Image (spheres, rainbow, N blue to C red):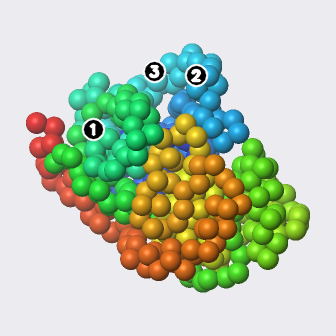
Amino acid sequence: MVRIVYGVSGEGSGHASRARVMARHLLDSGHEVKMVSYDRGYRDLADEFDVFETEGLEISSQDNQVSMVKTFTDNLKKLPEGHRRLRALRHELFRDFQPHCVITDFEPMTAYLAQHYQLPLISLDNQHRMRYLAYDCPPWLRKDRVVTETVIRAMVPKPDVSLVISFHLGQPENNHTFVFPPILKRDVLQAEPQIGDAILVYLTSGFDPFLDILKQFPRERFLVYGYNREAVEGPLHFRSFSQTGFLQDLAACKAVVATAGFTLLSEAFHLKKPYLALPMKGQFEQELNAFQIQQLGYGKCVRDPSSEAVGDFLYRLPDYRERLQDYVSSDSTEIKAKLDQLLADDLKLLKEYML
């Protein structure tokens, strides 16, 4: 039995979703797990696991663009509470619980405390593919790439082993990084995909001009999530959010239109859905995701939306669908087996990476 502190970023739902899958596996394997998260991650996990609520950093955006000023000021306000929670985290989880190792899904406090107490640290996330995997980067993103790698290094200074999840399986640049397909929720794995007549659209506020573009395609039916209302405006069918309804529509749609977040991309590709990506400007990972979608032939990247771009995407749906037949997803058996290997024999293999 290994005592594990598992830090989980509270940004969005993807970190908590895969942490739920991995934490269940660790508990079923007989290990003792105490999780650490904040905001949405804490709310999503606290119903099932022993979760310490910490304070976390967040990326603030406005009109589908990262706002550096708002990000800085919003996080600055959290510093006093963050310091108090860090002291509590050290006392309750690291001194009292005395973990044998730490796993972090892009949660910085647990990563830093692992280093402070000289504990083995495993990073398990999609962010480290941008730090440790080889990949093509378009010229206009090279400066953002350097900045992003610096941020990742600041959040998780030096993991002993990185378990990287990625839909773009590049080659690791060192011998302590291992690459796996995305970790999917049980409901997604059990879904039976069909090719229906509707297009699923998942957007948040600030996309009204793009919705006006979609109205120029009256023969299509767009199921619009993210505005949390029920209404019909021409081809736009607004839906209130529900996890069951969203997954049903995702499995039955003929294509997806959304920002380029990692979790929805992974679910769409598993279900073989062509993807029109509208990356959030100033968010390097989304920009890279959208670029790689187009590079792989799974869909189209649109940085400046237009009716011509939407029309081209719709025209090429058969081509994207054919390319997606080669996409290989997983039930997470491989990454679970690797984690089991690292934790076996009193962490013997994991400790070897610390030398």
CA gap, disc 3 to disc 2? 23 Å
Which amino acid does the dot numbered 1 rest on? Pro
Q: Which mark is residue 72?
A: 2
**Image-quadrant location for residue 218:** bottom right
Q: Residue under label 3, please give it.
A: 87
Q: CA distance from mark 2 to mark 1?
A: 26 Å
Secondary structure at badge 1 equals: loop
Residue at 55 percent of width and 36 percent of height: 282
Left or right of 102 in this view: 18: right
Report whether residue 143 is seen.
yes
Q: Point out the tag, 3 or 2, that comes first from the N-terminus.
A: 2
**C-alpha separation, residue under disc 3 versus residue under disc 1:** 22 Å
Q: In the shown orientation, is residue 316 left or right of residue 284?
A: right
> Does residue 60 appear to the left or right of 133 in the view shown?
right
Does the image show residue 145? no
Name which residue lies at 45% across and 48% down.
288
Work out whether residue 29 or residue 181 is closer to the camera in this orientation and state it: 181
Q: In the rendered image, which residue does mark 1 sit on?
A: 159
Percent from the top left, x then y, of residue 18?
Answer: 46, 56
Q: Earlier in the sequence, mark 3 or mark 1?
A: 3
Which class describes the residues within 10 Å of circle 3: few (<14), some (14-19), or many (20+)? few
At mark 3, the secondary structure is helix
